[in-house]
Image (tube, rainbow, N blue to C red):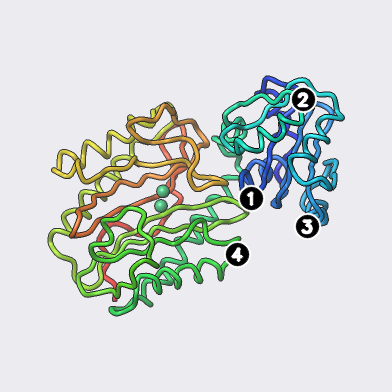
């Protein structure tokens, strides 16, 4: 079990205040509550030097007792912001820090209107603590990556000409859910033919059947013990065209070169530039519009950013995706995405599904 008191102490040391308030209502901040306490339901978490208080309603109180230990669990009977303001107000706290990136403006207004204590915004201190992972977190991320690899290997023989993108996505989702995964990391993206040029395509929009010669792109991941993998593989339905093979080869070289450059001390823009320059020199710079990668963990997108605009520097124990792509409107696209653990002399690639050549399926 994670050392929750240690995480709570680390948080108290980073904030400028005598309490921290995290609110998870309507999925506003499940990760902070889970990271700090192990609780996966809705509620408010108030942390002070003396106490760790979890305020939740009757739907979750039994669950909270099972998932957590060492917390004062209080039942919310005044509904959310009012109950939270009362619980904090009676404890006489002077500066209650909250994550402005995770809390709705109206909740802040509601609590301020009750005028029980000063609320002080800090962007997202828990996300900052989560940037580098412990060995236990890395094990969960490795398992999440392995589940995704295994599910994809099981999917490929089942893919057939005439199957729709949505069917292919659903089969992959079922394969992930049949394992010890908690679930899928995010909605499975399966796109075929010219749809592969659409970065965040939703397969339910267009029931397109797979056809001979289509590029077929899957972006997917598993969630294991809360931690998420994020992998993309592009395959070919039947024999690929020369153009498809050409862009696959460029994207693969960009993926490998960037992975080769990852180590602690490199900046997000530096690693991004390795892949971007290679794609630009091959003549496709305009066709790679997104950043090279992003951190993963309890969330599928978290720091560090690997993009031209990122201010992040890689540190040992960070986990990030490397996902260059080339997208040609009307033709199709290729993306190859892997998950890597940053080390001092290089990185450990935890997604292992083969990518050395454009695999033919169907
Ligand atoms: Zn992805
Ligand atoms: Zn990604």
Residue sitting at the far front: 113
The relative height of residue 26 versus residue 5 in the rendered view (above or below) is: below
Alpha-carbon distance for marks 4 and 3? Answer: 26 Å
The relative height of residue 274 versus residue 184 in the rendered view (above or below) is: above
The relative height of residue 330 versus residue 268 in the rendered view (above or below) is: below
Question: What's the mark number on residue 180?
Answer: 4
Q: Is residue 68 left or right of residue 169?
A: right
Alpha-carbon distance for marks 2 and 3? Answer: 28 Å
Q: Which residue is mark 3?
A: 59
User: In which quarter of the view is residue 165 placed?
Assistant: bottom left
Q: State the residue at coordinates (42%, 68%).
A: 169
Image spot of residue 173 (x, y percent)? 48, 67
Image spot of residue 353 (x, y percent)? 39, 59
Tell me which label, 2 or 3, sits earlier in the chain: 3
Mark 4 vs mark 3: in front? 3
Mark 4 vs mark 1: in front? 1
Q: State the residue at coordinates (40%, 67%).
A: 204
Regarding mark 2 in the picture, which secondary structure is present there?
Answer: loop
Regarding mark 4 in the picture, which secondary structure is present there?
Answer: loop
């Amino acid at each position: 079990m994670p050392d929750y008191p240690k995480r709570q102490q680390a948080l108290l040391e980073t904030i400028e205040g005598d309490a921290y308030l995290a609110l998870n209502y309507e999925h506003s901040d499940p990760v902070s509550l889970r990271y700090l306490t192990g609780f996966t339901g809705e509620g408010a978490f108030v942390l002070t030097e003396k106490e760790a208080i979890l305020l939740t309603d009757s739907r979750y109180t039994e669950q909270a007792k099972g998932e957590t230990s060492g917390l004062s669990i209080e039942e919310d009977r005044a509904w959310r912001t009012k109950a939270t303001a009362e619980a904090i107000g009676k404890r006489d706290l002077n500066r209650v820090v909250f994550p402005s990136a995770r809390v709705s403006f109206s909740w802040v207004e509601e609590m301020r209107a009750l005028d029980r204590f000063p609320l002080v915004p800090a962007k997202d201190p828990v996300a900052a603590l989560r940037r580098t992972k412990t060995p236990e977190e890395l094990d969960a991320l490795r398992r999440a990556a392995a589940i995704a690899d295994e599910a994809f290997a099981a999917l490929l023989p089942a893919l057939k000409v005439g199957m729709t993108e949505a069917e292919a996505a659903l089969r992959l989702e079922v394969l992930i859910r049949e394992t010890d995964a908690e679930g899928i990391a995010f909605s499975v993206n399966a796109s075929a033919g010219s749809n592969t040029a659409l970065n965040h395509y939703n397969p339910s929009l267009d029931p397109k059947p797979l056809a001979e010669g289509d590029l077929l792109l899957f972006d997917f991941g598993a969630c294991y013990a809360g931690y998420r993998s994020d992998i993309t593989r592009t395959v070919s339905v039947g024999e690929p065209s020369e153009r498809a093979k050409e862009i696959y080869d460029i994207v693969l070289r960009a993926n490998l070169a960037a992975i080769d450059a990852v180590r602690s001390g490199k900046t997000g823009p530096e690693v991004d530039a390795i892949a971007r320059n290679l794609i630009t020199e091959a003549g496709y710079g305009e066709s790679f519009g997104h950043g090279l990668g992003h951190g993963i963990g309890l969330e599928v997108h978290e720091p560090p950013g690997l993009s031209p605009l990122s201010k992040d520097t890689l540190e040992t124990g960070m986990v990030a995706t490397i996902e260059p792509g080339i997208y040609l409107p009307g033709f199709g696209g290729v993306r190859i995405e892997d998950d890597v653990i940053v080390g001092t002399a290089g990185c450990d690639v935890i997604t292992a599904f083969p990518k050395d050549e454009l695999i033919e399926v169907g």
